[in-house]
Amino acid sequence: MSIELNTNDGHITITDDVIATIAGGAAVECYGIVGMASKSQIKDGIAEILKKENYSRGIVVRQDNNHLHIDLYIIVSYGTKISEVAHNVQSQVKYTLNKTLGLEIDSINVYIQGVRVNKE
C-alpha cells in the first residue's frame, strides 16, 4: 500500500518502504539501540541485526481507514532501561515522520527482539 497526497504542485505517492526506511533511520539514532531486528525471526535467524538497506524487513507499516500504524522490531543495548529506550524510539520516530513526510502516526508499537552488548 502507499499514501497518496495531492498538493498544489501535483500528486505525491509515498510507499510503505519509504516510511519504513525513514522510521528505521530515526530509530537507530536513539540511545540504547544496537540495531533493527527482523520481524520474522524464524525465517531470518535469531535476532539478526539488519543493515541500513534492510530496515524495511524490521518494520511493519499498516494502514486502515486513513490511520497509520507502525511496528518496530529492535535490539537494545545491555544495561539500558528498556521502557525508556522504547519510549524514546516512539517519540523520535513519530517526530521524524511528522517533520519529514508530514504524516500523522496513530500508533507506534515497539517489539524488543533481543538484548546485546553494544560493541563500539
Image (cartoon, rainbow, N blue to C red):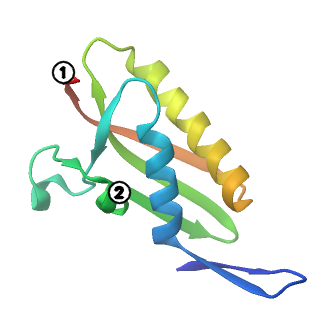
Residue 21 horizontal/vertical position (percent):
45, 60
Label 1 or label 2, whichever comes before in sequence order: 2
Residue 76 horizontal/vertical position (percent):
30, 28
Residue 54 appears left or right of 2: left
Residue 57 horizontal/vertical position (percent):
30, 61
Q: Residue at x 24, y 17 (%)?
A: 78
Q: Residue at x 9, y 52 (%)?
A: 45
Q: Residue at x 21, y 57 (%)?
A: 40
The quarter of the picture where residue 59 lies is: bottom left
Q: Residue at x 74, y 59 (%)?
A: 102
Disc 1 to disc 2: CB gap under 8 Å: no
Q: Secondary structure at mark 1?
A: loop
The residue beneath circle 1 is 117
Amino acid bearing label 2: Tyr
Q: Residues within 10 Å of mark 1 (few under 14, many from 20)?
A: few
The residue closer to the viewer here, 33 or 64, is 33
Q: Is residue 57 visible?
A: no
Residue 51 appears left or right of 99: left
Q: Secondary structure at mark 2?
A: helix
Residue 35 appears left or right of 69: left
Q: Is residue 116 visible?
A: yes
Compared with 60, 116 (above or below) is: above
Q: How many marks?
A: 2
Amino acid bearing label 1: Val
Q: Residues within 10 Å of mark 2 (few under 14, many from 20)?
A: many
Compared with 64, 79 (above or below) is: above
The quarter of the picture where residue 68 lies is: bottom right
Q: Extreme right residue here?
A: 8
In which quadrant of the rendered image does the C terminus lie?
A: top left
Residue 108 horizontal/vertical position (percent):
54, 46
Dot label at residue 55: 2
Dot label at residue 99: none
